[in-house]
Image (cartoon, coloured by chain):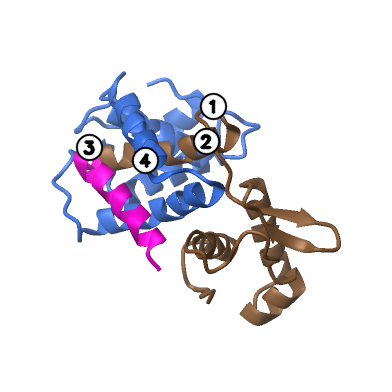
Chain colours: A blue, B brown
Amino acid sequence: VIIQIENDSEIPIYTQLTNQLTEGIAKGYLQAGVTLPSVRMLAADLGVNMHTVNKSYHELEKKGIIEIVPKSGAVIKPPRRISEGDSPYLRLSSELKPLIAEALVIGMEQTQIEHLVSNLIQDIKNK
Amino acid sequence: VIIQIENDSEIPIYTQLTNQLTEGIAKGYLQAGVTLPSVRMLAADLGVNMHTVNKSYHELEKKGIIEIVPKSGAVIKPPRRISEGDSPYLRLSSELKPLIAEALVIGMEQTQIEHLVSNLIQDIKNK
């Protein structure tokens, strides 16, 4: 995965890193069981603060995407069956809701929003 | 609209305010043309810092949801026709993408994500 950090973006660097690693995993460039580079190494590679990489790894762990294993490092977790009441489902739902409300408020139609989401899924799945 | 601020939430207070105002507009509790309370008044009502309300109003303005009119205040904009290439469409798309990627990575199926989004739209539209 090639990570591209934009220093002049409105999006915090740790969020850019979290998003790009997540997309890299979604696309299959990084697979379950793989250990991500150490915080020190990735920070040096990207020319960012170790604290930034650390924050991103902890965010990925909180999202259930990686597991931080003592001595081994940040290991990518396998996907699992998610049901409607599960906490990752509820968390995603509460994160999606304000964006969906925003789309409706500015004038997007229901079908337009559904179409956008389907396109994004296809776009992420296709490398 | 009844705004409920959770002080011990992980979500910053200005974001909670932005999200709840957006949902209030999506549900039709607050309609286009209506002027939101002044920053000073809403801050006093909610017991939050004026800076917090100000930040939320500026975020709503950036999202194209309100217009800050000198002397009149924060006026809710009417919905408009949004096309695929429009900047609000592209912004929403780039905000939705990491969440969709996350859903796929943790193991949600395409149909499950599409179903969740349709449910959220219904949920927001129904008061």
Q: CA distance from mark 1 to mark 3?
A: 24 Å
Label 4 Cα neighbours within 10 Å, binned few <14 / some 14-19 / many ≥20: few
**Which residues lie in the magenta part?**
B105-127
Mark 4 lies on a secondary structure that is helix
- The residue under label 1 is B85
| x then y, percent, for residue B11 | 49, 61
Q: Are marks 1 and 2 in contact (CB under 8 Å)?
A: yes
Left or right: residue A75 compared with residue A8:
left
Examine the rendering and report whether any part of residue A73 can be seen: no
Q: Which residue is mark 2?
A: B89
User: Which secondary structure is most common in the magenta stretch?
Assistant: helix
Badge 1 element: loop
Q: Residue at x 62, y 31 (%)?
A: A7
Which of pointers 1 and 3 indicates the residue nearer the eye? 1
Q: Chain of mark 2?
A: B
Residue picked out by circle 3:
B110
Q: Nearer the viewer, mark 1 or mark 4?
A: 4
Query: Residue A50: percent from the left, percent from the top?
Result: 50, 39
Against B71, residue A64 (above or below) is above
Disc 4 marks which residue? A111
